[in-house]
Image (spheres, rainbow, N blue to C red):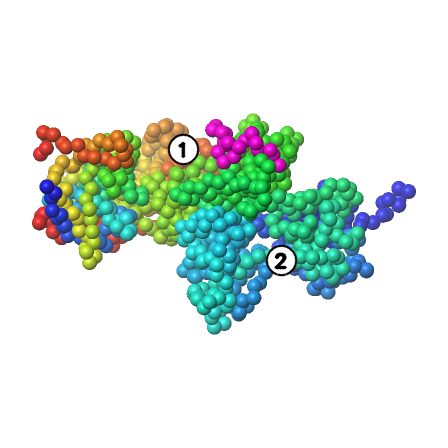
Amino acid sequence: MTTPKQWIRITACENIPLREGRAVKVGGNEIAIFNLGDHFLAVDNRCPHNGGPLADGIVSGTTVVCPLHAWKIDLECGSVTKPANTAVCLRTFPTRIDEGVLLLEASALEKRSEEEIVCRRVATSPAVLQPIPEPANQV
Amino acid sequence: MVEKVVEKKLEKLVVVGNGMAGVACVEQILRHAPKFEITIFGDETHVNYNRILLSSVLAGEKSLDDIVINGLDWYQKNGIDLKLGVRITDVDAVAKTVTGNDGSVTPFDKLLLATGSAPIIPSIDAIEKDGVFVFRNLDDTRALLERSRPGLKAVVIGGGLLGLEAARGLQVQGCEVTVVHLMDTLMERQLDATGGSYLSDKMNRLGVTVLLGLSTTAILGNGKVEGVQFKGGGSIPADLVVVAVGIRPNVLLGQQAGLETKRGIVVNDYMETSHPDMFAVGECVQHNGICYGLVAPLLEQGKVLAATITGNKGPTYQGTVLASKLKIMGVDVFSAGEIGDKVDGSEAVRFEDPSLGIYKKLTLKDHKLTGVILVGETADSHRYMEWLRAGTDLTALRRQLLFPEPGQDSGLDAAQISDSDTVCGCMGVTKGAIIHAVHDKGISTMAQLKECTRASTGCGSCTELCQHLLKAVVPDFQEESKSTICKCIPYSEGNLRDILRGQKLRSVQEVLVIYGDGIGCEVCKPALSYMLDMLWCGDHDEDRSMRYINDRVHANIQKDGTFSVIPRIRGGVTSPDELRRIADVADKYKVPMVKITGSQRIDLLGVKKADLPKMWADLGMQSGQAYTKGVRMVKTCVGTDFCRFGTQDSTSAGIELERRLENLYTPHKVKMGAVGCPRNCAEATVKDIGLVGQEGSWQVVVGGAAGKSVRKADLLITVETTEQAIEAAELFFQYYRENANYLERTYDFVVRFGMEKVRKETVYALNPVKHGLLDRLHKSKALSHDPWLERESPRTPTQFVQIEPLETTLV
């Protein structure tokens, strides 16, 4: 069964400056939203390395560089691009704009409240990362 | 007999034209015995300059001074009578005189016509309107530089080499540029249709609009240019129009002199015209049916002509394999030889990659290369040029035509080139000539090589190859630094600083778009931000998205995402009142840790981003800049106020130094110290800048370190007064700001530059140089401000606040 889409109104688009990120708390989760000029991307605001605030990082194309130790996160799929071969990834959240207000699709928040989802590479298509169901330790 | 020889007057050689061809030929003539009394007429008012680099001047990459080939001293040294600003209007072949537009009549024994060519002005209605330019000489370039400015709409008519270079130059000056080309292919003389479309794509991606297959019929506007109209009725707006549709040889004087002329003045293989005492060279001549408009042929012609005219007739000119290279940074285009597809029996070898924007095509006939087109990657051009020139049989190399064998450095293997191979096509310098210069004249640097052989002073595309050669034969050759900032922007910092200095680019994004990949990364963005701040003395367009978080919120991020707050306490001198306020703030905001730092300051650690502005207001103190690459502090000892040993008032001196430099940004952090005696209690000798007081004088020391490495600072200068000491510190400070690479500490910088050079260019520099450094420092200082004032006027509404969602719960 698929979860129905849940769009949450977040903030006026101009509150997130061009090529910067801002953090927002939604239902106990901190999410980093980035303004890439023609669209917005959202991921967990927690670097899988040491929990650094990704919203404070420098944006490079569609990646962000964590301000603490320069891990690089792909904002489109949530995977780590630096260091290479890091099999951890963050949740990403769809966004859309409605009359100048940014909306976030938050069904992923309910699915898993863990910040990090361990991923594995699928042998047939190495670029795609797929989540492995997290076992017992879910909070 | 002997007397007669002495009395024999030198023959008079009159040269009409002070451009590259005429003067290069005179240079060659001078290498033979001094046979002539030489007069050169130039209708421009400038000494001989490198015309092919005018587009680099327009693009701000070179200054007008940079492109001078021979200065006035060269003419004087060689006894040449230079007449600038005089146009020769008539040649009398019988009386053997030339007449100038100043009325002067000059007799000659031998005449050399090097009149070059003139821009073709197409028949377009109202083309004489104000705002229509050609782009041919230095005055044109200057006029374009004066007229262009950000926001103007510029239209370039003509999509050939010159038109495209002009377009890019205007774009760098801030104009919105459209190139209008009559043909369906850009640079159709050098490229095929596919190559042209790759080039169009690249130009479009750079932000230059390209319109193809359009014939311009009229310039619109009431007195001044307002637009251009096309055949069929369409039009586009324009504030500025550059006409660059081609050139035509200047043959009028040749005709007046009665020489045989067709499109150009006709010359034979010895560069002789139809008159025994008149010669011609360069773009104004036609050899074997061809008029050349590029630099390499005219230099080859000059050598032959020099031999002929000095009575050493023998060498012949056999025509030149034409090669052209587009001089637009970031747009690599090279073309040589035949480019047509439909030559009988020829075959084409192609490679293309649309994503990378690379297109290569080699045309071969009988296993010999006849033509090359390279777009997007031109590193192999040298290899192909040699194959073309030498007519190499490529049968054995068929598999390596487009892809050199692994391990070979794309044609740059200096050892593989034979001595007779040409390294610099523009100036006609062979590998042998360079080796010769190294062994016989002791050449050991690129600068000396350029001076001695002129290699790499033309289009500059052989610079890398020259460096490789020098590296191979000069034992202690120091390669000019070419390490780039990062992969986003393919220039070294020094190189980029020089480029940007002449330009109007104020924002990092503009620089990235024009010189980089348009995206940038966490390495280049802060580096470019610093560079623009420094170059514009603070008057740049600040873009916080290019800054590290510390420079967005003016506090140092900690491992848990909180921040530290360190207010400025100049010289480490505080007061009970200030300490009380700090204590109150620490209480009020529940600061988890209050710490005395190693820099004689107080650090409040564990502060939430949202609390920063309120805390700064409550503190009522300035930012201590402890989070940034900027001026940290001046650590001081108690100097003469209380200390029994103090010989200088180091506390006041340190506070004054800190006051003068605070709020400025630097390539890396700058920590300073001032001590009142050589006991060095405040450790000034391991600071970036230190003032060390002694009886009756100050030592100013620089480049010290007590961090990852420990280094004792070097003496910059010893001076008598405190004011002199502070000024010396300021000079070094600004010099470091302008010359160090981003993230290069002073201790690495002084080692890289050498203290001798640093001293010579700061405290021992000529007064104008010192004043320049201080003026720029003071200008930056005047525009600087306490960054913590952004608490009152944040750069963005959410600079410090966490966004509260409009809806909080999941629906």
Who is closer to the viewer here, B755 or B560?
Answer: B560
Residue at point 68%, 55% (across, down): B264
Magenta range:
B391-409
Give the mark, 2 or 1, whose residue is nearer the N terminus. Answer: 2
Q: Are marks 2 and 1 in contact (CB under 8 Å)?
A: no
Quadrant containing the N terminus of chain B is top right
Locate residue B455, reporting x and y percent: 60, 40
Task: Read off the residue under disc 1.
Answer: B747
* Horizontal and vertical percent position of residue B587: 13, 41
Amino acid type at image mark 1: Tyr
**Residue lying at 34% horizontally and 29% vertically, measured from the top left:** B708
- In the drawing, does residue B460 fall left or right of residue B311? left
Between B768 and B547, the one lying in front of the other is B547
Which of discs 2 and 1 lies nearer the camera? The answer is 2
**B222 is within the stretch colored magenta:** no
The residue at 61%/51% (across/down) is B293
Other-residue count near label 2 (Cα within 10 Å), few / some / many at <14 / 14–19 / ≥20: some
Amino acid type shown at disc 2: Arg
Mark 1 crowd level (few <14, some 14–19, many ≥20, 10 Å Cα): many
Indicate the chain on which mark 1 is placed: B
- Count the marks: 2
Q: Is residue B685 above or below residue B271?
A: above
Quadrant of res A115: top left
Question: In the image, is A84 to the left or to the right of B107?
Answer: left
According to the image, label 2 marks what residue? Answer: B248
Label 1 SS: helix
